[in-house]
Amino acid sequence: MTDLSEAPHGQGAPTTRGRAADFWRRYVRNRSAVAGLVILLTVIAMAALAPLLYPADPFSLAGRPMSPPMTGQFLLGSDTLGRDIAAGMAHGARTSLLIGVVATLVAVGLGVLMGGLAGYYGGWIDDVLMRLTEVFQTIPSFIFAILLVAVLTPSIVNIIIAIAVVSWPALARLVRGEFLSMRNREFVQANVVMGMADWRIILVQILPNCLSPIIVAASLLVATAILIESGLSFLGLGDPNVMSWGFQVGAGRTVLRRAWWIVTFPGLAIMLTVLAINLVGEGLNDALNPRLRERAS
Amino acid sequence: MRSLMLGAALAAAAASASAQESGGTMVMVTQPEPPNLASYLSTSGPIGQVATKVYEGLVTLGWDFEIQPALAKSWEVSEDGLTVTFNLQDGVTWHDGEAFDSADVQFSIMNVLREVHPRGGATLSIIEAVETPDPLTAVLKLSEPAPYLMVALNGYESPMVAQHVFEGTDIRANETANAPVGTGPFKFVEWQKGQYVRLDKNENYWRDGRPYLDRVVVRFIADASTRTAAMENGELHFAAFGAIPNIDVPRLEEMDSIEVTTKGYEYFAPIMQLQFNVDAKPFDDPAVRRAVATAMDREFVVENIWFGFGKPATGPISSNFAASGIYTADVPSFEVDDRIAAANKMLDDAGYPRGADGVRFSIVHDMTPYGEEWRRFGEYTKQVLAEIGVAAELRYEDVATWLKRVYTDYDYALSSNWLFSMPDPVLGVHRQYHSNQIRPGTVFVNGTKWSSPETDALMDAAKTETDPAARAELYAKFQNIIVEQSPIVFMHELEFTTVYNTKLHNAVSGPLGVYNSFADVWLEQ
């Protein structure tokens, strides 16, 4: 419990390569985290290769409607309008990852800002910001997201905004807690005495030292964001111009008895991706959490 | 869909061959629960499904929209079409025991329907007075001939209400709104909100031997799969207007105890359509509109999006009007072998070349915000447009915003939509094409801004033309111009299903379907 949390970040630390190797060694100790990483990389590869594998619009009416898997040109079958399920899934992976990552980044930005200010300054600023956070936390997040998208009209930008708005409060509280505990450490007080500006202390001194829990929380947030997006699309509140897994499940659910494959494959994709991200998050937690690390060594 | 209709016809034939039985309780489901039972105040479907058993009209309708007697025994229309004399049934009483007479007819038409009924104000506006020379005679004086009037005097559209119940009260707030008093075959007994309405046999009904049923119970079940299950296990005898989801219908139809029909909706004749804003580029050009009409595959849409419940439409007037001669199939057809190639050629010829990216022009396509099928239809339309070089972005808004966009702001290029054609073009069709129906803020009227002195004149003439042949000719011309100009792409005639238990007979006995009085319905014990 020395290098990361006690000393100011980036000064007199071991070589970056050594740390990375250390990190990786701890990560691979968790087998399920490795499995999660493999699945996640597969999904990322699928998203990256989608335009090459399926250059056509995933909404295009590619062939006979409701073809079962492995018939004709359809690997995973076609839906009620004859759209290729596999093409939809590949392009849907892009949507899911894009929304998951961007919404998380926005939420993390908001959460760090609110939590950081509250934790660093305390007092009335803390009171105001935390009461505001609580207001958001009292509203069930999925219902709130539905409301926001319905009001803002469904589009990819609005969906990202909605997910970010419902996700930041938990992060804000986490960051606030970390900042509160850092605020009175010697190195922070030393910086204050040295006359360093507040914003520099927050950004350069404290924040890097509480990155680990933020990274872990953010990785789990990606999974939540993907789930919320799928839920919205399932309910018909997705961007009608963008293919997504939730949309595929929603569009196929009425014909579940007649064409199981339409909902099954995208549904599996959602499940596996969310599972994988959770496993990766757990692995990151193992690798980054200092206390666990101490116990292990 | 053919087999469904054939099945219904056979069932109807079988029913009339066997002997009717009296007694029994029929259980039907209505979805959603009506807000009240005031059918003189609202045309809302669920209200009508219940209220038509209690209130009756002067006439009712046969399968080909032939006018049949109800509260009126017979009628004469004068030579000039300006006087209609109704001879009323003898010995009719209201459910509270008072006698029904011509004063009730006068009051219902002049004081109730013309004043508070949503469509009555327009439909019945040509009635200048109702004269009552004696208690069993009512004479309607018209300001102009109205060939569409008789059909509108049925029990769903124009219910006759009791003068002694309504006179001197605020008609909109009358206490019988939730406990109707009519002349119909069934008397209102009780309404357990959220559960059921109970209607009992009217022992003093004016038709001898009717109704057959002792009781009609109208149940309200909010969950769709529960309704399907209740139908499946025989708890329900009858469900109309999509109360059983289309997707469950084929499964139920295979059961021996259940019959399915798409008949009984001819009165509404809804047409699914794609409508253009003909006032704005690029759809101000009829050639572009015709290209879109050519590219759309109607059979595909019916089969794959509406699960077979519908049939391709040919023009602005539903094929349900074939019997009365108003409908004509003899209009320009958009059916070609290679739809996409033909449509592309039309756009090339019209001077809309593809750009470097293959796009001729970009539009936003608004989808009817009524649910799944309309979403799928929008997605389909977007793909078809892409194939003819039109880049379409889909927009899906809430109902209020969409209605305002289409009928108030006209801020759209292409929108899907569906409208009831109603039993006469004057009631359901003119509103979409007449230039005097471009009424910002009024919904389901002329939202395309189509305006043509020629079609206006044809509609005006047809409105007062009493000779059926001459009227048919006017409408034939009208249909040809509209289809040729295509302010609207006519997709298909929407079909609804009525699902009923085979023990129930005469369940669907005319174009009014579930809005019939059920006096002739009987239950096999």
Image (tube, coloured by chain):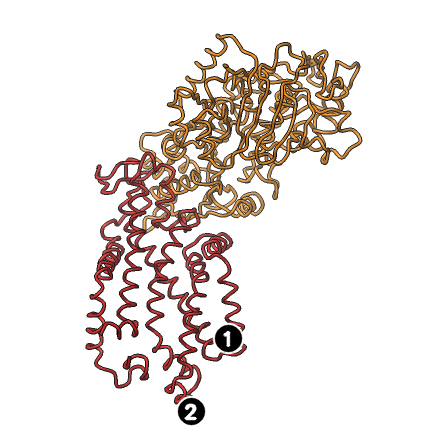
Chain colours: A red, B orange
Q: Which residue is mark 2?
A: A193
Which of the 4 quarters of the picture holds residue B473?
top right
Percent from the top left, x then y, of residue B325? 52, 18
Q: Crowding at label 1, few (<14), some or many (≥20) Cα neighbours within 10 Å?
A: some
Q: Amino acid at mark 1?
A: Asp
Query: Quarter-wise, where is residue B331 in the image?
Result: top left
Identify which amino acid the numbered label 2 is placed on: Val
Q: Label for residue A126? A: 1
Percent across and percent down for residue B52 are 61, 24
Q: Quadrant for residue B261, please give it.
A: top left
What residue do we see at 45% from left, 79% from top?
A120
Q: Secondary structure at mark 1?
A: helix
The answer to whether residue B200 is seen in the rendering is yes
Residue under the point 46% across and 34% down: B226
Depth check, front residue: B259 or B156: B259
Q: Position of residue B316 (x, y in %)?
A: 50, 29
Task: Please state, as top left, top right, bottom left or bottom right, where the N terminus of chain B lies in the image.
Answer: top left
Res B459 seen here: no
Tell which of B191 and B250 is nearer to you. B191
Residue A88 lies left or right of residue A145; in this view the side is left
| Vertical side of A83 occupied by A139: above or below | below
